[in-house]
Image (spheres, rainbow, N blue to C red):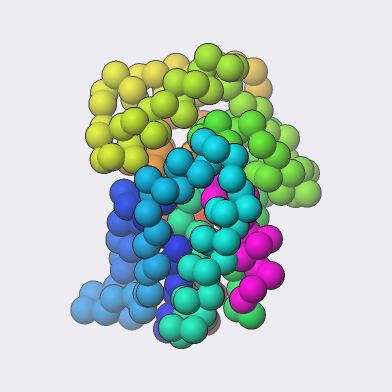
Amino acid sequence: MKTIGLIGGITPESTILYYRILNKLAASKYGESHSAKVIVNSVDFGEISQLQSENRWDLLNEIMSKAALSLEHAGASCILICANTMHLSIEAVKAVVNIPVIHIAEATSKQIITKGLKKVALLGTKYTMEKTFFIDVLKTFGIEAIIPGLEDRDDVHGIIYNELSKGVLNPESKLIYQEVIKLLIAQGAEGVILGCTEIPLLIKQEDVSVPVFDTTSIHASAAFDLASN
């Protein structure tokens, strides 16, 4: 297979998931002794989260672009930004490299279409839920997204940054997520997008009564398919 480049560290927990998924896919396709060809450029999540809070997307774009360039120069055939929120920088990244940068929302939309769904709930950081970069991509595929109310958005966001990003999995937080999802299903959601790459640590398909779209697995699988063909 060709080499996959990961912009990781946002957070380390989700980067570990990407690496694990890619290696399982490689073992499944090529034989159990095989692993994926991966290069990781791991950025500092503390710096990233601080700049996000300061709304310094100019500096975030610069960090992401430099990381992508280093991956291309190191021999990556494609690039994954291992975080939904940081896809706010994807256009800046695409502008500096000559290899594919796989968009997490596009890969997820294609999976939703295969299920025939038209209305889905979107969970993620406040940046992902409240800004339009993910929702706009869904719209281009004819998919409507609904998000939690303000208080629930605060809860979902807080759990990501204060717990999941640190590898902390609280049963109480799982129940909060499940209640938020139930409310969104009652509002017509036919499926749920786990639109933060850490949420799959907490929420699985068996925890939800409608189809769950794990953006981490979907994103990693899209890159593997590209790199192994």
Q: x, y percentage for residue 42? A: 37, 62
Q: Position of residue 125 (x, y in %)?
A: 51, 35
Q: Quadrant of residue 169?
A: top left
Above or below — where is 62 with respect to 147?
A: below
Q: Confirm whether the magenta stretch covers residue 64.
A: no
**Residue 115, horizontal then vertical, whole percent:** 61, 46
In this rendering, is residue 1 above or below 172?
below
Please provide the residue range marked out in magenta.
Answer: 85-97
Q: What secondary structure predominates along the stretch shown in magenta?
A: helix
Residue 222 visible, this orientation: no
Q: Does residue 88 appear in this view? A: yes
Q: Residue at image x 39%, y 19%? A: 176
Q: Quadrant of residue 95?
A: bottom right
Residue 148 drawn above or below residue 78: above
Using the image as rendered, state which of residue 110 and residue 99 is in the foreground: 99
Residue at image coords 37%, 74%:
38
Looking at the image, which is closer to me, 58 or 33?
Answer: 58
